[in-house]
Image: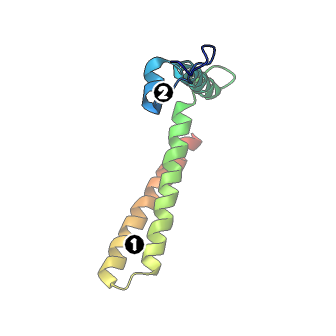
Amino acid sequence: MAGEEPDQQEPLKIHPSETIKTGLIAGMARGWESKSVEAQIEDRESLRTVSGENTHKDAGREREAELLDMTKKRLEREIAFASSRRFREMKQRALAHVERQIEELNSGSST
């Protein structure tokens, strides 16, 4: 200690894994977490209509319609590139089933 100046301290060296344990970043993490929770609450509230009814069913129908549409496009693509007659027939039956589901979904949502 003979050659050191007493006013200067060595900088605090902390391993990155210790930063969370010591709480140096914990405050920031909680801040980001609370903003995420706040955003989730706002998203949930934005799903409600002006009258206050939840549009959860409508969102579910939209998701189902999108999935059916993607499935239909995939089946059409598979049919177009099918080399086996039996494979093509199987995909055509699956496509007919998906088209019936789309019709049922559309007729159910229009009432």
The image quadrant that residue 109 belongs to is top right
Q: Position of residue 2 (x, y in %)?
A: 53, 18
Question: Which residue type carries mark 2?
Answer: Ile
Q: CA distance from mark 2 to mark 1?
A: 64 Å
Q: Residue at x 43, y 59 (%)?
A: 98
Instruction: Residue at 47%, 32% (x, y): give it.
Output: 16
For marks 2 and 1 on the same chain, the one whose residue lies earlier in the sequence = 2
- Above or below for 60 versus 14: below
Which circle marks residue 92 in the picture? 1
Q: Identify which amino acid the numbered label 1 is placed on.
A: Gln
Quarter that holds the C terminus: top right
- State whether residue 4 is above or below residue 109: above
**Residue 49 in the image: x percent, y percent?**
65, 26
For image coordinates 43% across by 30% down, the residue present is 17
The part of the image, by quadrant, that contains residue 43 is top right
Q: Hey, which residue is sitting farthest front in the picture?
A: 2
Residue 21 in picture, x, y percent from top left: 43, 21
* Tag 1 secondary structure: helix
Residue on which the image places disc 2? 14
